[in-house]
């Protein structure tokens, strides 16, 4: 299959994406519902690729036009990042796992590789732009929703429940937990949730909510959360030039709660350290970077 994808590149330039990778990760509840059955999971993956083809804004694209392959894994292992995150959230407690330990429970998931060209090598099916942003020719949120609907319809999972909306609300809840660190309150969370429902938790809403969180981490305060989520950063700034209170060093020092102030300073210190390390690495690894660029020119594939 890899050979087929490698050879399915006629019409692509040196810098064009050659393939894309997709990760399919059912929840523990979903895996339990299908009895951790690999054959059922395979049928769902095939349906996923049907949805993939149908979410391109091009007529006549079907699963038969795709060149793709998938591999299923039934185990996962803890990574160094997960160890770091657990220690930060549970400071002073004994961590129950270490890097490389196998995760408990059902962990079945799939990695899919799909060519950026159709089978006849007459059309390019780009999911990402050259800058690795979601292409306007592909509906990512629509793809995610169709996959959730497919699972429900195929296996009669949670009939009568809008699982997609339920999942999106859980994601929004996680974002609200981040915003709580910067002084946001319950009334604002409810407003954020209402805007999400009004916008059907679409890609624009998700992008703008991420932008809101990023503004907080920069030390800025968005005065009209609802308008920011509806308009997005650029349009909001155009319509409301005074709608974002920019931070300065004195404002960062004026955070009233000692614990938040400590977290704040640690955050900026960590970002600064990462920046210094990155600059140092650039100087030391210039030769390696050149080799990496050459490798990427030979074969460029991205995941999303």
Image: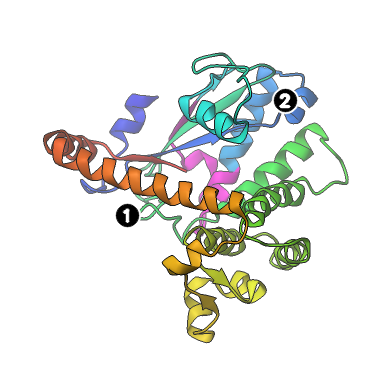
Where does residue 257 sit, x and y in percent of width and height?
62, 56
Where does residue 287 sit, x and y in percent of width and height?
11, 35
Q: Is residue 267 above or below residue 287?
A: below
- Which labelled disc corresponds to residue 109? none
Please indicate whether residue 273 sits to the left or right of residue 256 in the image.
left
Q: Quadrant of the N terminus?
A: top left
Residue at the spot 77% in from the left edge and 39% down from the top edge: 152
**How busy is the neighbourhood of tag 1: few (under 14 within 10 Å), some, or many (20 plus)?**
few
- Secondary element under disc 2, as helix, strand or loop, is helix
**Residue range of the region highlighted in magenta in the rendering:** 51-70
- Which labelled disc corresponds to residue 31? 2
- Secondary element under disc 1, as helix, strand or loop, is loop
Colour convention: rainbow
Please indicate whether residue 115 sits to the left or right of residue 200 in the image.
left
Farthest residue in the left direction? 287
The part of the image, by quadrant, that contains residue 156 is top right
Please indicate whether residue 56 sits to the left or right of residue 14 in the image.
right
């Amino acid at each position: 299959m890899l050979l087929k994808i490698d050879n399915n590149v006629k019409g692509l330039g040196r810098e064009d994406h050659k393939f894309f990778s997709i990760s399919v990760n059912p929840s523990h509840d979903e895996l339990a519902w299908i009895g951790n059955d690999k054959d059922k999971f395979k049928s769902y993956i095939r349906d996923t690729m049907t949805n993939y083809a149908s979410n391109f804004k091009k007529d006549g694209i079907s699963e038969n036009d795709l060149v793709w392959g998938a591999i299923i894994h039934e185990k996962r292992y803890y990574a160094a990042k997960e160890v770091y995150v657990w220690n930060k959230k549970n400071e002073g407690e004994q961590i129950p796992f270490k890097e490389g330990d196998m995760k408990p429970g059902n962990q079945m998931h799939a990695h899919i590789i799909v060519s950026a060209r159709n089978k006849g090598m007459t059309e390019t099916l780009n999911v990402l732009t050259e800058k690795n942003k979601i292409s306007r020719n592909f509906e990512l949120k629509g793809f995610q929703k169709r996959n959730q609907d497919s699972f429900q319809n195929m296996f009669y999972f949670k009939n009568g429940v809008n699982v997609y909306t339920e999942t999106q609300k859980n994601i929004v809840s996680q974002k609200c937990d981040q915003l709580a660190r910067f002084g946001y309150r319950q009334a604002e969370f409810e407003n954020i949730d209402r805007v999400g429902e009004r916008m059907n938790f679409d890609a624009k809403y998700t992008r703008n909510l991420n932008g809101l969180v990023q503004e907080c981490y920069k030390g800025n305060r968005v005065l009209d959360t609802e308008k920011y989520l509806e308009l997005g950063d650029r349009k909001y700034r155009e319509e409301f030039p005074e709608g974002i209170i920019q931070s300065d060093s004195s404002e960062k020092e004026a955070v009233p709660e000692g614990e938040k102030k400590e977290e704040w300073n640690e955050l900026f210190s960590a970002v600064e350290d990462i920046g210094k390390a990155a600059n140092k690495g650039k100087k030391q690894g210039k030769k390696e970077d050149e080799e990496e660029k050459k490798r990427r020119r030979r074969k460029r594939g991205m995941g999303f």
